[in-house]
C-alpha cells in the first residue's frame, strides 16, 4: 500500500521504493506503536508525505512551490478511491494483463522493454532508428489506450 501511494504521488517507481524504505526507517525510529488506536496506513502515509515534501524540494531545488494541502488532498483521493486496497489493485492488474494481450505484438514489446526491462527511451529510439520524441509520443498513445482499456474492463464494458 505504501509503495503504491508513493508511486501515486511521485510517478517514479525507484523514488517510491526508496522513500518507502525511508518511511519504514523513520517509523521504526519514532518508537510509537501506531496500532494502538490509530490507522497504521494513515500513520505511514503521513510520514511518507513529509518525506515526499523533502524529496521534491531537493529534486527541484526550489523551482516548484508545493501548494499547501496538496499532498494531503492527494492522500484523501488515494484513500477515497480505494487505491489503498489490495483487491482494487489486483483487479487493475488483471485488467492490465488482459489489455496488454490485446495490443499488437510490436506495441506490447515496446511497453515491456520500457517498463519491465526499464530501458531508456533514447536507447530504444536509437535501436529502432526513430527520434526519441517520436517514440515517447508512441508510448504515450499506447499508455492512453491501455488506460482506456483498463477502465472499460473494470466498468464491465468490452474494449477492442
Image (spheres, rainbow, N blue to C red):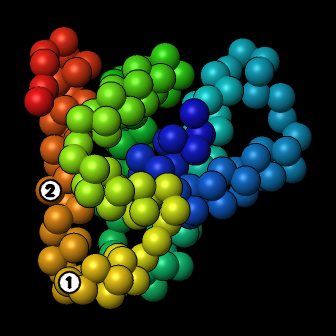
Whether residue 53 is visible to the viewer of this picture, yes or no, is no
Q: Residue at x 86, y 50 (%)?
A: 29
Q: Is residue 49 left or right of residue 29?
A: left
Q: Are marks 1 and 2 in contact (CB under 8 Å)?
A: no
Of the pair 126 and 60, the residue shown nearer to us: 126
Counting residues from the N terminus, which is met first, the one under dot 1 or under dot 2?
A: 1
Which numbered dot is residue 141?
Answer: 2
Question: How many numbered badges does the structure rendering display?
Answer: 2
SS under mark 2:
helix
User: Where residue 21 sits: x, y (%)?
Assistant: 73, 53
How busy is the neighbourhood of tag 2: few (under 14 within 10 Å), some, or many (20 plus)? Answer: few
Q: Of all residues shown, which one is farthest toward the front?
A: 105
Q: Quadrant of residue 155?
A: top left
Quadrant of the snapshot with the N terminus:
top right
Q: Residue at x 14, y 56 (%)?
A: 141
How busy is the neighbourhood of tag 1: few (under 14 within 10 Å), some, or many (20 plus)? Answer: few
Q: Residue at x 46, y 71 (%)?
A: 119
Quadrant of the snapshot with the C terminus:
top left
Q: Residue at x 88, y 40 (%)?
A: 31
Whether residue 148 is visible to the viewer of this picture, yes or no, is yes
User: Where residue 46 sits: x, y (%)?
Assistant: 58, 42
Of the pair 128 and 34, the residue shown nearer to us: 128
Q: Which residue is mark 1?
A: 130
User: Where residue 22 sits: x, y (%)?
Assistant: 72, 57
Closest to the camera, between mark 1 and mark 2, is: 1
SS under mark 1:
loop
Disc 1/disc 2 C-alpha distance (Å)? 16 Å
The relative height of residue 48 versus residue 36 in the rendered view (above or below) is below
Amino acid at each position: 500500500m505504501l509503495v503504491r501511494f508513493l508511486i501515486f504521488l511521485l510517478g517514479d517507481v525507484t523514488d517510491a521504493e526508496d522513500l518507502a524504505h525511508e518511511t519504514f526507517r523513520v517509523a521504526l525510529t519514532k518508537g510509537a506503536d501506531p496500532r494502538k488506536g490509530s490507522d497504521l496506513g494513515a500513520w505511514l502515509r503521513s510520514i511518507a508525505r513529509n518525506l515526499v515534501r523533502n524529496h521534491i524540494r531537493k529534486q527541484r531545488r526550489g523551482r516548484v512551490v508545493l501548494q499547501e494541502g496538496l499532498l494531503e488532498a492527494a492522500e484523501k483521493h488515494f484513500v477515497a478511491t480505494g487505491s489503498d486496497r489490495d483487491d482494487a489493485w489486483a483487479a487493475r492488474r488483471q485488467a492490465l494483463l488482459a489489455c496488454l494481450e490485446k495490443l499488437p505484438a510490436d506495441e506490447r514489446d515496446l511497453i515491456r522493454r520500457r517498463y519491465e526491462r526499464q530501458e531508456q527511451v533514447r536507447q530504444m529510439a536509437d535501436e529502432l532508428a526513430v527520434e526519441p520524441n517520436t517514440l515517447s509520443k508512441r508510448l504515450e498513445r499506447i499508455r492512453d489506450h491501455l488506460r482506456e482499456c483498463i477502465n472499460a474492463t473494470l466498468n464491465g464494458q468490452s474494449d477492442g
